[in-house]
Amino acid sequence: MRILVTGAAGFIGAATAEALLARGDQVIGIDNLNAYYDVSLKRARLARLNDRDGFHFVECDLADRNAMQTVFSQHQPRRVVHLAAQAGVRYGMENPHAYADSNLVGFLNVLEGCRRSKVEHLAYASSSSVYGANTAMPYSVRHNVDHPLSLYAATKKANELMAHSYAHLYRLPVTGLRFFTVYGPWGRPDMAPFLFTKRILAGEPIDVYNFGDHARDFTYIDDIVEGVIRTLDKVAEPDPAWDGAKPDPATSSAPYRLYNIGNNQPVALLDFIRCIENATGRKAVMNMLPMQPGDVPKTFADIDALAADVGYRPKTPIETGVRRLVEWFREFYGVH
């Protein structure tokens, strides 16, 4: 089937596109190749995709309405995986308009393209950051998420609301996926797993916030991709049991679903760092710092709904995932 993947040069987007191509789908990838992080890494991911049959790349910006209309009208995708976004929590404190352009205007253009092209199913990236000030663990898609702690989180919550309105008004099937700290080969340079690996291998200190008292539901990229594709294949349907008097945030009388995709097994940050130390054979020099604005001390995904609906279960132990990340980093950057 022909599938549009936005953010195809990104970490999750490239891995998802590769998996779809491997099973025989045609993939239309779009990305604006912005300079939020190293563009050469994005181009290297794209180069791997361009070597595959069935992949077509379009460089365009989500916020460019005319360009997005052209992509949908020319390629007529049957389904869409929307993974492009302005990512990062702290970046939004200095560059708020980037989040409005990409995550709000861009998402609206994706929704409009899906509506007008009569797309069968839109699966889109939300984020664990929407849980914000919530402290009840594990995070459940049935929890209230009205207290975001960053602009990024607020835009992701807005995406869920926008998607629901299109599901209700136009019966567009939509599935939102709340990702929990994704790591692995070809990962994002602005995220801790990549940064820690880079600096530990270089013998440089790493910044450890909240004095190391963090835990994250670190989720390996292959497990994330499996969850994305399983949900893409299960077209969202209305929940016949949904009750407006006692509304379930994760379902609807419209064709709308929300899921957490995580490892369901939080790892203490200091334990994650030890895994990198073991994989690199080097000791980390840790610069202990207080909590950063917009950050949360712990994330923990309740994935029961995803397991029940599509049979999702993460399989990759943290030690295995970190070893693969370190092996890729050494090879890609020539570090020995």
Image (spheres, grey):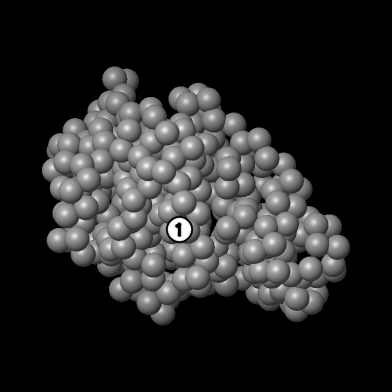
Q: Residue at x 30, y 58 (%)?
A: 58
From the image, which quarter does the N terminus lie in?
Answer: top left
- Asked if residue 172 is positioned above or below residue 127 in the image, the reply reads above
- Percent x, y of residue 316: 68, 40
**Position of 299 relative to 197 (above/below):** above
Task: Tell me the amino acid under the disc marked 1.
Answer: Leu
Dot 1: within a 10 Å radius of its alpha carbon, few (fewer than 14), some, or many (20 or more) residues? many
Report the residue marked by disc 1.
46
> Which residue appears at 53% of the width and 43% of the height?
224
Q: Is residue 157 visible?
A: no
In the picture, measured across the screen, residue 81 lies left or right of residue 69, that is right
Percent coordinates x, y for residue 29 in the rendering: 35, 52
Left-right relation of 70 to 92: left
Vertical relation: 238 (above or below) 136: above
From the viewer's side, name the closer residue of 187 and 169. 187
Residue drawn at x 69%, y 48% is 321
**Residue 51: image x %, image y %?**
46, 51
Q: Horizontal and vertical percent for residue 7?
A: 39, 56
Q: Which quarter of the figure has residue 2?
A: top left
* Location of the C terminus (image quadrant): bottom right
Instruction: Work out whether residue 160 or residue 183 is closer to the camera in this orientation and state it.
Output: 183
Could you tell me if residue 170 is visible in this image?
yes
Work out whether residue 314 or residue 58 is closer to the camera in this orientation and state it: 58
Q: Nearer the viewer, residue 332 or 269?
A: 332
Instruction: Name the side, left or right, on which 290 lies relative to 319.
Output: left
